[in-house]
Amino acid sequence: MPAAPSLRTTSLHPVHCALGARMVDFGGWDMPVQYSGIIEEHNAVRKAVGLFDVSHMGEIEIKGPEAAKLTEYVTTNNVSKLKIGQAHYSGLLYDTGGFVDDILVHKVADNDYFLCVNAGNQEKDFEHIRSMNRFDAEVNFVSDQYSQIAIQGPKAMATLQKLTPVDLSSIKYYWFADGPVDGTPARIAHTGYTGEDGFEIYIPPSETHRMWNLLMEAGSEFGVKPCGLGARNTLRLEAKMALYGHEIDASISPLEADLGWIVKLDKGDFVGREVLAKQKENGVTRKLVGFEMRGRGIGRDGYEVYLDGAPAGWVTSGGPAPTLGKNIGLCYLPTAHAIPGQSIQIMIRNQPVDAVTVETPFYKRAK
Amino acid sequence: MYPENFRYTKEHEWVLADGDSATIGITNHAQEELGDIVYVDLPKVGTRLEQSKSLGSVESVKAVSEVYSPVSGEVTEANGLLADSPEKLNEDPHGNAWLVKVKLSAPDEVKSLMTASEYQTYVGAEK
C-alpha cells in the first residue's frame, strides 16, 4: 500500500506494509501504529524483545573546535560532564524557557556531538541550533544518513549480541559504541524509550531492510515481535517518559514538566536559563503529575482535570497500562496539588470520573 | 462472515430485529479497525436512543470511537459482560459481545439499513 504522496516514509516502509501493519500519519510520516496488536507488542517488550522502526527520528551533528560550547549553550543538561561514548537526555529550549524539542546528546569526541531529535521537530531544531551558533562550530543536518532501529526488552541484548562482535554488556546504560553489526558500521546506543532495557542502533538507510530481517531472525528464539507506535506510546507512558506535543511543547518549561533533573542552572549561560532561574526561585505555577483512574473510564489527552469541582488542569497523555492492568495518565495541575494522593476528577464525555494522583514512574523495571 | 439476518450501518454497527425488539452491536470490521478494545461505555436501561445518534463509545488502547444507534428505541438491557471483559468485543462481536437490547419505537427503520451482502461490498470498497 503506497503512502499518501504528502507523507514521508522510512526505508522500512515496504516491510511494514508486507507485515500488514496498520499505518498512520505521525508528524508527517507514514508509520506503523501496530502489527499484531498493541497489547501483544507491549507485552513482548516487557517480557522478551520487540523491534521498532524509529528511522523517522532526526539526527544532527555539532562538530568543530567549539562544538562543546555550542552544544552546552543550546541544551539544558551538563555537556561538560559527558565522557566520550556517553549520552544523556536533554532539553533544547527557546529563551522563553519552553521546549523546542527534547533530545539525546551523544558525545562522539571532544569536538563531535551527535543529537537524536524528534521526527516532527528536526528541521525546526536544526534551524534553531544554527541561529544560536556564534561559536567556531558547524551544525550538520544528517538525518538522511541514518536509519534507526530500537531493540527493546529483557532479551534485547541477547538478540543484538548475536550480530555484533562489540561486547554489549560492556556498554553501560546511556553509553554507546561505534562498531559493526553484521559487518555494517553502526552506532550502538544503550538507550530507549520503553522503560525496558534495550538498544538503539543507527545504521545506513541502505542496510536497514537487511538489518531488520537479521534482528527478527536473531530474536525469533525469544519470540521477538515487530512493534508499532501504539506500543511505543503505552510503554513510554508507563515509564513516564515525555512525548513532545503532549507533556512538553513551546509553552512548557522542563521545571513544569518535572524534568528538573535535566536542567543544570550552575553550568553557565544557556538558552532559556534566565527564565528557568526565575522559575526555580519563585516556583512554577503548574506541574506535571501522574494519575490513576479510580472510576470507570480512561482519561485521555486533552481532557479537563477538575479539583474540588472546578477546572484545574488537563491530561497530557492517558490510556490503559497493559503491564499494570490500570488506566493511567499524566496531567498538569497547580503545583500545590501536583503531588501523589490528591483526589481529582477527569471530565470524560461531560461526566466527571474519579481519579487519584500517584507516584511516578508507573512502571520501573527490576534491575 | 456477516450474518444474513443482521442489518448494517455505514458506521459499522449491526442490528438484529425480532418484531419490536432488537439487539445492537458493532461489526467485525469495526473491531478489527479499532484493535485491542479496553473499555466500553453503554447506556443505562431505559435510555431512549435515536437512530444515527450516539449510543455510547468503544475505546481501544489508542482511541475513543462513538457508537451510533442503528435504530430508535428504548434500552431494555446493556451487556454486562463488556464491563469486565471489553476484550470479548474483539473475539465475538457478532455474538456474545452484543452491546444493547432495545424495544424499537420505529421498527421500519431497520429496512433502511444495509443487508449483509451490501455491507460486505461496502467494507470491501472502503479498504
Image: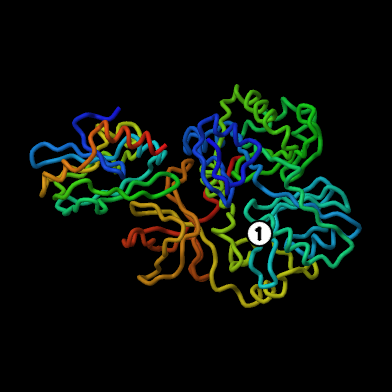
* Callout 1 secondary element: strand
Horizontal placement of A185 versus B101: left or right?
Answer: right
Horizontal placement of A323 versus A306: left or right?
Answer: right
Percent from the top left, x then y, of residue A141? 76, 52
Viewer-nearest residue: A164 or A171: A164
Q: Residue at x 21, y 44 (%)?
A: B78
Tell me the colour scheme of the image: rainbow
Viewer-nearest residue: A308 or A298: A298
In the rendered image, the quadrant that contains the C terminus of chain A is: top right
Percent from the top left, x then y, of residue A278? 67, 77
Amino acid tagged 1: Asp
Viewer-nearest residue: A85 or B52: B52
Res. A136 image quadrant: bottom right
Viewer-nearest residue: A226 or A238: A226
Give the crowd class for mark 1: few <14, some 14-19, many >=20 residues within 10 Å: many
Q: Is residue A241 above or below residue A49?
A: below
Horizontal placement of A10 versus B12: left or right?
Answer: right
Name the residue tied to disc 1. A101
Q: Residue at x 62, y 54 (%)?
A: A120
Percent from the top left, x then y, of residue A250? 61, 66
